[in-house]
């Protein structure tokens, strides 16, 4: 223990030498730990998939080109899929609700909430609980992604490292955001996008956590190097579109229409997810069993459409490669285009029930899959009407992936970079920009899949001081005080003050001289020091005489500082020069005045603007 303590002390000394040096050390530590955590989680999912879904049904979902290649049974028993998903859901529910209820759901939202509302604090057990619960949710066939759990795992590591190094609350928040981006950047092999994501995913209205960028650009590559060194450096979807070059400006309208479709699908996805989540929150079933019920619905869908099981990335690879027959082998004699369109809705439903019921998995990967399927549908329609115009489905599939999550996740910049890194090409960024921007505006902030996002930095409790302090310096005590202050003269009796406090609910009564100047103040604590039979005592014998007052022309920030510094509940407000009492002010008065001005200047209620 002493050697560990000495090591931490040495790190602190190095960190104190410069801002960049500090965050190079912190970011590097977060990146390494997040990369190792993402690697363990990745192999854990693969192990549980072989054990549960593969062991029970004989079916192992295909993986994309840059991941472990699965051996698929020639004769899987899909009727047993619900057995696997139910077992996984039950195990996940027991793990989550007996150890860490905040590990339920998609993870990234909890990390965002911790940044904004919990001072960046994440319990140390969360990374392990989240990882194990998610392994069983996904490995049993539940519909979801790895990124949400990885985000919460990385965020938990960031928070713990900040605590170990005794960083400030502000720095702990940054460390959490950095860990979130580093974890996602590692498991998606997308370090550049992971760094951008750490600052972008916190807000639904296009704002950005700029302070997270420097450490994130250290942490995300570090996490990526750890993960890729063990799992391989091939992009997740290989170099899928390396031979494609965008040259046809006339195809831009197709991508814009695709962006509109992805925006509408994103609204459907978010609405479905939170409707199911609300339903499971209202039913009278022990919460341990709710993930099992949601998993059962997914399992039944998986009997007929195994494409909805797991992350779906392997089937997405088929779409990118143009192997449509492998993903839609003439189901129920439906045309391929209708089968793909049906899978879009079934993936929405399966993910909503898997994760919305309390299961542990991400919502990022399903949104990429849903967008990819929509892109494939568009390609079939376009290719039928204009054969050869867009020769392969890959560009529309990949842009669909970007557009849907860019809109519903409110991360347009990060998702374009991420999908480009996942596919090994930047060749379709130009049409992607049009589709993503259109989807982003069609979805709008109220339909974000991450309900813990806030619209902008000024709406975040994490930045309250930055935005309230300048405003409080411009407002005066006279703007917030209560001018109808009850007072007593020095000849009043203790019984008079006691009766007024009980009858009127006053927290303090100023005692005034003949000219209205404040001589003192009496509170309930002053009165309780006097015996009940001594009510006839003069009030000036028990009042507090050294009274802290606020001038009516002082700023609200001055008043707040006096209230906090002197640990009092209220301040008498006096007229400058004469010292005559003109009112009383409390912290509640200050906040009411502040809220009133904010609403007048912003034109909206910031407390509700970010609700989905």
Image: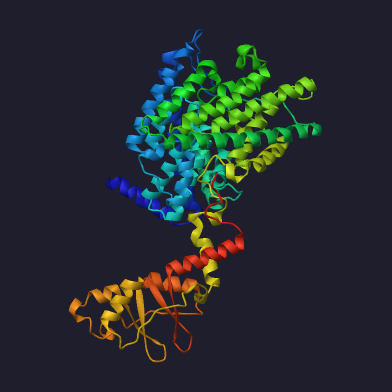
Quarter of the image that includes the N terminus: top left
Taking the image as shown, residue 451 lies to the left or right of residue 56, namely right
- Whether residue 260 is situated above or below residue 603 in the rendered picture: above
Can residue 110 be seen at all in this image of the molecule? yes
Residue at x-position 59% and y-position 57%: 604
Q: Quadrant of residue 520?
A: bottom left
Residue 144 position, x and y percent, is 50, 29
Judging from the image, the colouring scheme is rainbow
Of residues 276 and 110, the one nearer the viewer is: 276
Residue at x-position 51% and y-position 31%: 352
Can residue 27 be seen at all in this image of the molecule? no
Quarter of the image that includes the C terminus: top right
Of residues 384 and 413, the one nearer the viewer is: 384
Residue 60 position, x and y percent, is 49, 17
Residue 457 position, x and y percent, is 55, 54
- Whether residue 558 is situated above or below residue 410 in the rendered picture: below
- For this orientation, the residue located farthest to the top is 75
Q: Quadrant of residue 290?
A: top left
Residue at x-position 28% and y-position 76%: 498
- For this orientation, the residue located farthest to the bottom is 514
Of residues 596 and 134, the one nearer the viewer is: 596
Taking the image as shown, residue 397 lies to the left or right of residue 139, namely right
Q: Quadrant of residue 514?
A: bottom left
Tag count: 0
Of residues 489 and 245, the one nearer the viewer is: 489
Residue 488 position, x and y percent, is 35, 83
């Amino acid at each position: 223990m002493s050697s560990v303590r000495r090591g931490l002390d040495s790190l602190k000394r190095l960190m104190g030498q410069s801002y960049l040096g500090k965050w190079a050390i912190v970011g590097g530590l977060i990146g390494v730990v997040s990369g190792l955590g993402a690697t363990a989680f990745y192999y854990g999912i693969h192990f549980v998939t072989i054990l549960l879904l593969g062991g029970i049904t004989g079916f192992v979902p295909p993986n994309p080109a840059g991941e472990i290649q699965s051996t698929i049974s020639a004769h899987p028993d899909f009727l047993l899929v619900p057995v696997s998903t139910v077992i996984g859901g039950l195990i996940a529910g027991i793990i989550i609700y007996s150890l860490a209820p905040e590990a339920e759901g998609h993870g990234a939202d909890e990390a965002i909430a911790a940044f904004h509302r919990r001072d960046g604090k994440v319990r140390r057990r969360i990374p392990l609980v989240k990882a194990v619960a998610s392994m069983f949710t996904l490995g049993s066939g539940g519909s979801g992604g790895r990124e949400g759990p990885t985000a919460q795992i990385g965020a938990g590591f960031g928070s713990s490292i900040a605590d170990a190094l005794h960083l400030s609350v502000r720095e702990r928040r940054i460390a959490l955001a950095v860990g979130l981006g580093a974890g996602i950047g590692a498991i998606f092999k997308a370090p550049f996008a992971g760094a951008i994501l750490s600052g972008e995913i916190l807000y639904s209205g296009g704002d950005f956590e700029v302070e997270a960028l420097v450490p994130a650009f250290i942490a995300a590559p570090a996490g990526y190097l750890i993960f890729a060194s063990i799992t391989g450096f091939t992009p997740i979807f290989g170099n899928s579109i390396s031979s494609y070059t965008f040259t046809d400006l006339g195809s831009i309208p197709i991508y814009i229409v695709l962006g509109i479709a992805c925006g509408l699908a994103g609204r459907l996805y978010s609405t479905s997810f939170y409707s199911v989540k609300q339903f499971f929150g209202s039913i009278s079933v022990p919460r341990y069993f709710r993930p099992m019920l949601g998993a059962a619905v997914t399992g039944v869908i998986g009997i007929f459409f195994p494409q909805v099981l797991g992350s779906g990335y392997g089937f997405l690879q088929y779409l990118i490669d143009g192997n449509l027959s492998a993903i839609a082998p003439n189901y129920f004699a439906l045309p391929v285009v209708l089968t793909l369109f049906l899978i879009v809705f079934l993936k929405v439903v399966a993910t909503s029930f898997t994760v919305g019921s309390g299961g542990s998995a991400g919502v990022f990967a399903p949104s990429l899959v849903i967008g990819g399927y929509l892109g494939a549908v568009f390609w079939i329609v376009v290719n039928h009407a204009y054969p050869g115009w867009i020769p392969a489905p890959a560009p529309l599939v990949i842009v669909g992936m970007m557009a849907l999550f860019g809109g519903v996740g409110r991360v347009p910049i990060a998702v374009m970079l991420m999908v480009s890194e996942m596919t090994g090409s930047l060749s379709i960024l130009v049409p992607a920009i049009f589709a993503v921007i259109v989807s982003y505006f069609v979805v709008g902030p109220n339909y974000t899949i991450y309900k813990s996002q806030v619209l902008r930095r000024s709406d975040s409790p994490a930045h309250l001081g930055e935005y309230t302090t300048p405003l409080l310096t411009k407002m005066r005590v006279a703007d917030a005080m209560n001018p109808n202050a009850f007072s007593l003269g020095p000849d009043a009796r203790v019984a008079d003050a006691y009766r007024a406090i009980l009858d009127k609910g006053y927290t303090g009564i100023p005692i005034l001289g003949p000219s209205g100047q404040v001589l003192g103040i009496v509170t309930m604590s002053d009165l309780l020091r006097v015996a009940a039979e001594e009510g006839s005592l003069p009030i000036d014998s028990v009042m507090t005489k050294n009274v802290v007052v606020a001038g009516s022309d002082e700023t609200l920030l001055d008043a707040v500082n006096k209230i906090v510094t002197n640990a009092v509940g209220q301040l008498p407000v006096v007229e400058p020069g004469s010292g005559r009492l003109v009112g009383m002010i409390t912290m509640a008065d200050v906040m009411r005045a502040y809220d009133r001005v904010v609403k007048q200047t912003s034109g909206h209620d910031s407390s509700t603007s970010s609700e989905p």
